[in-house]
Image (spheres, rainbow, N blue to C red):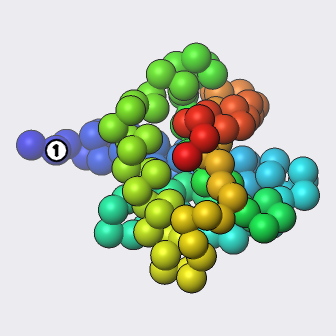
Amino acid sequence: MTTRSDQMRGQIAFQAGHAAEDCVARDYENRGYAMTRRRWRGSTGEIDLVARDGDGFVFVEVKKSRSFARAADRLMPRQMRRIMAAAEEFLMREGFSMMTPMRFDLALVNAMGETRIVENAFGEF
């Protein structure tokens, strides 16, 4: 049974996640990336942020926790596979080929709202 307290915690976590995504999106935009999608959802999964990098795309997974290390520990191999499948679906839906340059970044956000970007965190796809 879900209590009101559980619902409040869930809502706070949801809002904190959105705030972390907004913070990371601003970071990418400040570095010259064009943010093309936020919270893109396909049948295979969800991608937190999609940014343009010249002719290619950067698919960004945002993880928030008390520390950068704890945030990084929250990304599991199964989730990486789901994100990669969603990226394939995104490219197909948008009319791009699988030869389109892309990378997968992990954006970490700590309790202080600081960000750390791990570029190409999933390795080359």
Give the residue at mark 1. 2
Quadrant of the image occupied by residue 49:
bottom right
Given residues 11 and 48, the one toward you in this image is 48
Farthest-out residue, front? 99
Q: Quadrant of residue 55?
A: bottom right
Q: In the image, what residue type sits under mark 1?
A: Thr
Residue at 69% of width from left, 32% of height from top?
118
Q: Nearer the viewer, residue 74 or 11?
A: 74
Left or right: 2 with respect to 19?
left
Name the residue located 63 percent from the left edge and 22 percent from the top edge.
Answer: 68
Quadrant of residue 10 within the rendered picture: top left
Residue ID at (60%, 41%): 124
Q: Using residue 89 as the reference point, say whether residue 113 is left or right of it.
A: right
Q: Position of residue 4 (x, y in %)?
A: 25, 46
Residue 71 versus residue 18 in the image, above or below: above
- The reply, left or right, for residue 20 in relation to residue 73 is right
Task: Give x and y (percent) for residue 45.
Answer: 37, 59
Up the image or down, 5 lies above or below 43; here it is above
Q: Quadrant of the N terminus?
A: top left
User: Closer to the camera, 8 or 91?
Assistant: 91
Identified at 47% across, 22% down, the residue is 73
Single out the residue that lies furthest toward the left.
Answer: 1
| Residue situated in front as seen by the camera: 58 or 69 | 58
Q: Residue 18: x, y in percent?
A: 57, 53
Residue 107 visible, this angle: no
Q: Residues within 10 Å of mark 1 (few under 14, many from 20)?
A: few
Residue 54, image x, y percentages: 83, 64
Q: Is residue 22 above or below residue 115?
A: below
